[in-house]
Image (cartoon, rainbow, N blue to C red):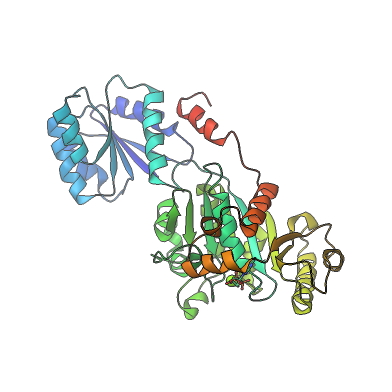
Amino acid sequence: MKIKVVSQNPERAEELARHVRASGPGLDVQAAASTLAGLPAVINGSKPGLLVLDEVDAAGLDALARMAQAYPEVDAIVISSEQSPAFLLRAMQAGVREVLPPPVTGPALQAAVQRLLRKRGPGVGAAKNGDVFAFMSCKGGSGASCLAANFAHMLSTRDGRTAALIDLDLQFGDALVTLSNHRATSNVAELAHSINRLDADLLRASMVSISDTLAVLPAPEELSQALEVKAQHVEAIIKQAREMFDFVVLDVGRSIDAVSLQGLDMARVIFPVLQLSLPQLRDAKRLRMLFRSLDYPTHKIHWVVNRYQKATDFTLDAVEQALGAKSVTTVPNHFASVSAAVNQGVPIEQIARNGPVTKALRDLAQAVAPADAGHKGSWFASMFGNG
Ligand SMILES: Nc1ncnc2c1ncn2[C@@H]1O[C@H](COP(=O)(O)OP(=O)(O)O)[C@@H](O)[C@H]1O
Ligand SMILES: [Mg+2]
């Protein structure tokens, strides 16, 4: 996020900017020496997400209120010795998030910035190094989309860590509708069009926020748009997402092309999803050969048998043998919870908190990305400058 720190005194502006920069990696913090009357010129064109303003008095608040009308999306933290209820109310009306009394210490300013980053939701603030997972369907209807979306949701509801779900099934993607009935604001193809402008703000604006910790980048609405997306676009989008989210989950669908291979290459773990039937097993074997020819190590491939029920013609041992896998993960067949979730467009966990599919996904998440018991604690520690 872009942050502008404004003080009339240039050295003071620099000093405050240094404190703000220490609030977390990945912040683009600039200092500007200006009066508050000069704010429009300071902001002009630079589109900061946050202003940190030094020595704000009543007249300064008026200037800020005028600016807030023109740029409602800009938040402000102000430093002011005025703390009267009337001043604080006026500040609130001008869109100020926090009024800090001087002298402002580094930790106090950092805590205020971090509170605001948290409020802004997923993908804001610290540059992360997100873990990438890819779900792939061995045959259409295996359940890859369903599992990808709900796996991403599961990762986002455990310990405050954030997840992005990116729909790379460009022609038939349904990741967004699997989780919500929010409308898409943009999609992978539109983002590919503006790839030269891609940054955290653009990616965030292109995604649909499902919750504070989960956001979805949908597939294009039109088939023709899908053809315009190239591997290098996907590479840039995943890279950007990794900086913003703790986890990046890809639904790569079932076609093998430059776009899906880009996603598979960048994943730490690939989950090919199959059901126990001869045609599905046959396609799974084909995928296995592909993964081999791509030199993917076996530990990168994590086979998932979906809609598993014991009484079938195939045993899991036979599947493991056919796929050369030490073990496969099973997700049970549970029509009631899955179809209710799919039809209502909500995560399965919301329909059946302890249902068999929810449990299987929770175990899978725990196996490949253990919940971080200290995560919330370490955030508080870093907030107070000792973490
Ligand atoms: N574990 C499950 N139990 C019952 N039904 C499931 C399960 N997983 C998926 N389904 C059903 O299968 C349908 C197809 O799944 P989907 O995720 O769209 O497959 P794919 O993306 O591999 O083509 C879903 O709409 C859902 O109703
Ligand atoms: Mg699908």
Image point (19%, 45%), residue name: 67
Left or right of residue 327, residue 91 in this image: left
Left or right of residue 41, residue 196 in this image: right
Image point (38%, 34%), residue name: 113
Q: Position of residue 197 (x, y in %)?
A: 42, 58
Image point (31%, 29%), residue name: 13
| Residue in front for this viewpoint, 25 or 142 | 142
Q: Is residue 279 above or below residue 129?
A: below
Q: Position of residue 317 (x, y in %)?
A: 86, 63
Q: Position of residue 145 (x, y in %)?
A: 59, 67
| Residue in front for this viewpoint, 279 or 49 | 279
Left or right of residue 65, residue 170 in this image: right
| Residue in front for this viewpoint, 230 or 178 | 178
Q: Position of residue 283 (x, y in %)?
A: 75, 75
* Res. 199 in view: no
Task: Point out the image quarter for the N terminus.
Answer: top left
Q: Is residue 348 above or below residue 106?
A: below
| Residue in front for this viewpoint, 89 or 330 | 330
* Res. 65 in view: yes
Image point (48%, 48%), residue name: 213
Picture quadrant of ligand 1:
bottom right
